[in-house]
Image: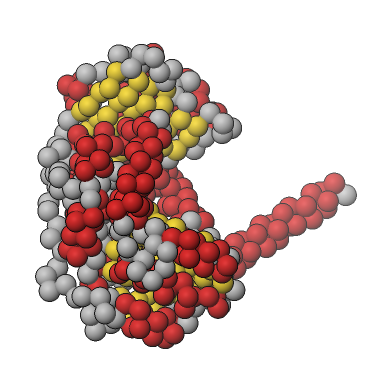
Amino acid sequence: MALRVLGVTQNMRTFMRGVDMIKRYKSAATLQKTLLNIPATQVTKLDNGLRVASEDSGASTATVGLWIDAGSRSENEKNNGVAHFLEHMAFKGTAKRSQTDLELEVENLGAHLNAYTSREQTVFYAKCLSKDVPKAVEILADIIQNSKLGESEIARERSVILREMQEVESNLQEVVFDHLHATAYQGTPLGQTILGPTKNIQSIGKSDLTNYIQTHYKASRIVLAAAGGVKHDDLVKLASGSLGGLEASVLPPDVTPCRFTGSEVRVRDDSLPLAHVAIAVEGCGWTDQDNIPLMVANTLVGAWDRSQGGGANNASNLARASAEDNLCHSFQSFNTCYKDTGLWGIYFVCDPLQCEDMLFNVQTEWMRLCTMVTEAEVERAKNLLKTNMLLQLDGTTPICEDIGRQILCYNRRIPLHELEQRIDAVSVGNVRDVAMKYIYDRCPAVAAVGPVENLPDYNRIRSSMYWLRV
């Protein structure tokens, strides 16, 4: 009887394993089908060169925005900060709308109007009901073409930006990344901060703002992107009516090559409780074929902080070491891309006495990526990267942002199923190859703020960027 029961149990287990496999195959097929059936991103180019791109999901809300190929990289030392200043001035009234009228109009629609500036892009966008998309497009077009730029508003925003700079200076992660860019791209536009130096903020006037608009706000450098409940043909008509008069740029935007310099900057402040450190090598640009393998390598290193559980059970080697040996409070790897260059590295926060041990473990993990990374680790990183990619596209605003950025960077939006296939195609050999190319025996850029006396000097850090083994 026991044998019969045992046999039935074994048969049942075999059957259940088969069911589980069928479920897995079904879910995989469903994922593929889902990715293939996501609404296509339609792109239309107007006569003046402005691109209109949208994804219609049939939702009751929509996000629509203007992505402009101009940021702090388009500035020089004298006008550094003007792009961000212009972002602040955008909502201070236009030729036909006072600031109060603009704010009331947006509030009455129940919409949200926002903007941000990065090193290579300036963005103005609105989230609203689908039926209000025409009004949102008209408001956005009015903002970038007819901003009043009044002297009193400029003076008021000057003090607002100076206060914002004080807030940014209290965010040590922002401070460290600004220092990292300043040392890695020293003497080039990418080394400048987005907000600009205090002396520039105090001197920027209407002529500087007007000159920047006339130079960079050209139709061929602008993308009108939308996601949610929006009809592409209707959006094209709206763009033709509201933005068709924008001047087309005769020449492509001048992109000054920004050389990477292996170097360091340390701001020692023993009054701070924790050390904040970033170390990075030069990565690749958006369109480089090495970008996907570098993203996988970046995901493999991962991120961790003390609030997470796991300890010895963490999949990431660095997270496991950090938890077991109390190396740091948190760390996060990053892969920051620009048009022709990038920063690939890690940022961590640790106790003053742990700087050396944490950096040793980081560089050991980097060398392991170059030489001994395993198939299982790469497979896990690929799955995690695909999951993160899908989770980040949850809502009309992140989808709209993805559309606008990709049209500017790639001149097309890469379909999700294509991106998934490109990630799946990354092998262990690809990860080792890009790690050897970008990390092994390369001069890193280092930025450190806080009690960093125990951080090894630059020559020691540089000498740990390779292994000599028999």
**Residue shown at 19% from the left, 75% from the top:** 248
Quarter-of-image position of residue 455: top left
Q: How many marks?
A: 0
Quarter-of-image position of residue 61: bottom right
Q: Position of residue 406 (x, y in %)?
A: 33, 64
**Residue shown at 23% from the left, 55% from the top:** 206
Most extreme residue toward the right is 1
Residue 115 relative to residue 223: left or right: right
| Residue nearest the observer in this picture, 282 or 218 | 218
**Residue shown at 20% from the left, 28% from the top:** 264
On-image quarter of the C terminus: top left
Q: Position of residue 190 (x, y in %)?
A: 20, 46
Most extreme residue toward the front is 152
Q: Is residue 336 visible?
A: no
Residue 258 relative to residue 415: left or right: left
Q: Is residue 456 above or below residue 202?
A: above
Q: How is the model colour-coded?
A: secondary structure
**Residue shown at 38% from the left, 22% from the top:** 275
Q: Position of residue 145 (x, y in %)?
A: 30, 69
Q: Position of residue 401 (x, y in %)?
A: 41, 62
Q: Is residue 285 above or below residue 214?
A: above
Q: Is residue 380 above or below residue 172?
A: below
